Amino acid sequence: MHDTHPLHSTLSDLSPPNVTLPLPQDQWSFEPSLPSFTPVPVDDIQHASTSASSLEDSSSRIVTCQWGKSCGVELDDLTAAGIARHLKEYHVQEWDNRARGRCEWHGSPCTNSTMYYASFGKHIASVHLGATARPCEKCGETFARADTLDRHMKLYCRLRSK
């Protein structure tokens, strides 16, 4: 036998001869399953209280997707997340939130500027569907988003309290 420093020993020097460690039988038999999706009726969804009034009005109406030339699928969820889910499932094969693209919603005026894919759902819900619309309590003007209404109320509404 030769003398070696204990730190220079190999694994075979430390283990008894002819010992094999058993591997778990199912180590490579894992079969991933795809998540299942069960549609939930819009009436059963609890919406956040800040947007409940505007979404209750829009949840009862039937909206057909106008993305591209002829989608025609009825949207079951008019929230930004629901619209984004539809776009991912039916229209954008390689969705990347950081990628940029143009809105292809047909029949409504839209800017030609690009936006992040992550913004498509919110953009369509607010600009094209008015699902997030909020009226000013003072003058009645309608705004697509809550932050725009807040800015109007603080800075621009001619009927605001001074």
Image: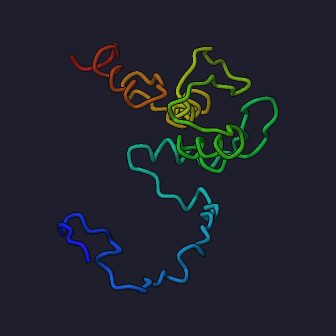
Asked whether, in this view, residue 162 is left or right of residue 103, the answer is left
Asked whether, in this view, residue 113 is left or right of residue 146, the answer is right
Residue at 56% in and 25% down: 100
140 relative to 70, above or below:
above
- Residue 79 position within the rendered picture, expressed as x and y whole percent measured from the top left: 54, 44
Q: Nearer the viewer, residue 141 or 101?
A: 101
Q: Quadrant of the N terminus?
A: bottom left
**Quadrant location of residue 13?**
bottom left
Residue at 53% in and 76% down: 27
Q: Nearer the viewer, residue 126 or 6?
A: 6
Q: Nearer the viewer, residue 159 or 11?
A: 11
**Quadrant location of residue 111?**
top right
143 relative to 11, above or below:
above
Residue at 40% in and 21% down: 139
Asked whether, in this view, residue 160 is left or right of residue 81, the answer is left
Q: Quadrant of the C terminus?
A: top left
- Label tally: 0
Residue at 80% in and 29% down: 69
- Residue 60 position within the rendered picture, expressed as x and y whole percent measured from the top left: 62, 49
Q: In the displayed orientation, state which residue is furthest to the right.
A: 70
Q: Nearer the viewer, residue 41 or 13?
A: 13
- Residue 25 position within the rendered picture, expressed as x and y whole percent measured from the top left: 54, 83
40 relative to 144, above or below:
below
- Residue 20 position within the rendered picture, expressed as x and y whole percent measured from the top left: 44, 84
